[in-house]
Amino acid sequence: MSDASATATVADRVVRVRERIAAAADAVGRDPGEVTLVAVSKTHPPERLRAAMAAGVTDLGENRVEELVAKQDRVEGVRWHFVGRLQTRAAGDLVGRDVLVHSVGRRKLVDRFERLADDRGEVQRVLVQVNIGDDPAKGGCSLAQVDDLVAYAAERPHVVVEGLMTMPPLPPPDVDPNEAARPMFETLRATADRLGLATTSMGMSADLEAAVAAGATIVRVGTAVFGERGAGPWTAPLG
Ligand SMILES: *Cc1c(COP(=O)(O)O)cnc(C)c1O
């Protein structure tokens, strides 16, 4: 695909995703402005990210630390989100980069962020990831552990928990992803409300309607914005 037509396609897709968010919000009497679209740009090159920004995208998400850092150094004027599994030792590469980390699911990671952010005079903003469907393929703490983890982080002054994130298990092919995810999204929102947390990051390309209906304040949308993903992470050209 030529650069110009790839750009047009991303712009068209952003419009379409915004329409889906607006329709889902309207259906339950929510203001679509309460929902932040995080365009998940993993595997895609910086020029594709800029095309999304030209179409009004204000927030980008990545799932690998190295890829996020390389793109953040090349793409300016956008807010960044880290949505992938995070190794404790890689956490240091994110602190001080003004990234909202969606994937904190254990105390060790809270401890690591607390120490690094304190050392650097920073505050690390995070979401606690909840493995709401108890899916062995997904990260995050269990629903039974979330109160404890949020309370644990609340005692650490350089870590701020802004809310909760979840990713439901992949539904079987004959099940509507929105229907499968709906009860899990409702549980996540109710848990956030009970804990006094404003942000819920939930809903992807296939199930964003159910997420918006349940009260998502962030949806993380990859394929529906950028098209099919590449085979592996984008890496910066040498030299
Ligand atoms: C890749 C990814 C997304 C986007 O998924 P799509 O189905 O392409 O919209 C959302 N959240 C996380 C955590 C991801 O890794």
Image: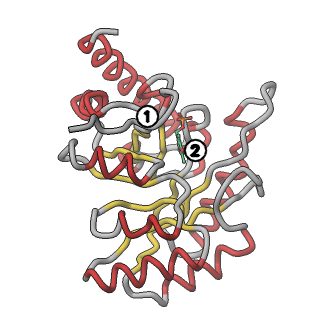
Rendering quarter of residue 171: top right
Label 2 sits on a secondary structure element that is helix
The amino acid on which the numbered mark 1 sits, given as a three-letter code, is Thr
Tell me what residue is drawn at x 28 percent, y 78 percent. 122
The local crowd at label 1, few if under 14, some if 14 to 19, many if 20 or more residues have their Cα within 10 Å, is some
Front: mark 1 or 2: 1
Q: Position of residue 94 (x, y in %)?
A: 36, 64
Q: Residue 236 versus residue 221: which sits nearer the camera?
A: 236
Q: Is mark 2 within 8 Å of ligand 1?
A: no
Q: Position of residue 33 (x, y in %)?
A: 35, 45
The residue pinned by badge 1 equals 43
For this view, does 72 lie left or right of residue 141?
Answer: left
Give the mark nearest the N terminus, 1 or 2.
1
The local crowd at label 2, few if under 14, some if 14 to 19, many if 20 or more residues have their Cα within 10 Å, is many
Q: How far apart in space, not on screen, are marks 1 and 2 (Cα)?
A: 29 Å
Quadrant in which the C terminus appears: top left
Label 1 sits on a secondary structure element that is loop
Q: Looking at the image, is 96 positioned above or below residue 51?
A: below
Marks 1 & 2, CB-CB < 8 Å contact? no
For this view, does 204 lie left or right of residue 79?
Answer: right
The amino acid on which the numbered mark 2 sits, given as a three-letter code, is Ala
Tell me what residue is drawn at x 46 percent, y 49 percent. 64
Q: Please give the label number shown on residue 81.
A: none
Tell me what residue is drawn at x 61 percent, y 55 percent. 166
Q: Residue 48 versus residue 169: which sits nearer the camera?
A: 48
For this view, does 126 lie left or right of residue 186?
Answer: left
Q: Please give the label number shown on residue 213.
A: 2
Q: Looking at the image, is 162 positioned above or below residue 153?
A: above
Tell me what residue is drawn at x 38 percent, y 70 percent. 92
